[in-house]
Amino acid sequence: RYFAKQIAPVAEETGVKIGVHPDDPPGLLLGNIPRPIFSSFEGYKRAIEIADSPNIGMGLCVGCWLEGGPRMGKNVLETIEYFGGLKKLFVIHFRNVTAPLPHFRETYLNEGYMDMYKVMKALRKVNFEGVLVGDHFPRMAAGAGGLAAQIYTVGYIQALIERANEELPPAG
């Protein structure tokens, strides 16, 4: 509460939007200290209400939300619908994982347990206008690391954006 009340006026005055990233991984103890605020839908809802600022919102890491699974309180599509409807989604980290906690592995966008087209379509439905970035690029074949995986991810994201825009054209 103290931090939000101090930082919100500064963010508003300077025109900075602060998108708060979920705990990674969500809901686990860090040094035996619980992290309950940014590990659930209700925690985010409460924090955004406390901040009460157009410049304080969510940096939604889809991968973290998927890692949290049911413990997040709402699934990623419901989260996008709610916070996107409030125009509180400022940045999206776009990644997929194999399963929720306790055991998950980051994977290619098309190989995880979430249909990432559904995520892109949900973002399109709320007219998301923030920043969307690929996140945590898994290695490709032996020796084909970072750059190849980034290129693959960006191309895949672009195809999802184009498909969502074809299916749900911009309003107005």
Image (cartoon, rainbow, N blue to C red):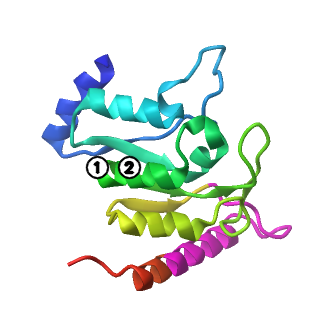
* 141 to 3, vertically: above or below: below
- Find out whether residue 140 is within the magenta segment: yes
Going by the numbered disc 2, the residue's amino acid type is Tyr
Q: Which residue lies furthest to the left in this view?
A: 13
Q: Dot 1, crowdedness within 10 Å: few (<14), some or many (≥20)?
A: few
The circle drawn on residue 167 is none
Q: In the drawing, does residue 26 fall left or right of residue 13? A: right
Whole-percent x, y for residue 77 in the image: 50, 56
Q: Which residue is drawn at 47% across and 37% down?
A: 41
Q: Which residue lies furthest to the top in this view?
A: 32
Going by the numbered disc 1, the residue's amino acid type is Leu
Q: Which residue lies furthest to the bottom in this view?
A: 166
Assign the magenta stretch its main secondary structure: helix
Q: Residue at x 54, y 37 (%)?
A: 73
Pointer 1 with pointer 2, Cβ within 8 A: yes
Q: Residue at x 77, y 37 (%)?
A: 102
The one nearer the camera, 64 or 126, is: 126
Q: Would you name the residue on which mark 2 appears?
A: 82
The one nearer the camera, 14 or 32, is: 32
* 60 to 152, vertically: above or below: above
The part of the image, by quadrant, that contains residue 12 is top left
Element assignment for label 2: helix
Q: In which quarter of the image is the C terminus?
A: bottom left
The circle drawn on residue 86 is 1
Q: Which residues fall within the magenta stretch?
A: 136-160
Say whether residue 90 is visible. Answer: no
Whole-percent x, y for residue 32 in the image: 66, 14
Whole-percent x, y for residue 55 in the image: 24, 42
Whole-percent x, y for residue 137 in the image: 66, 60
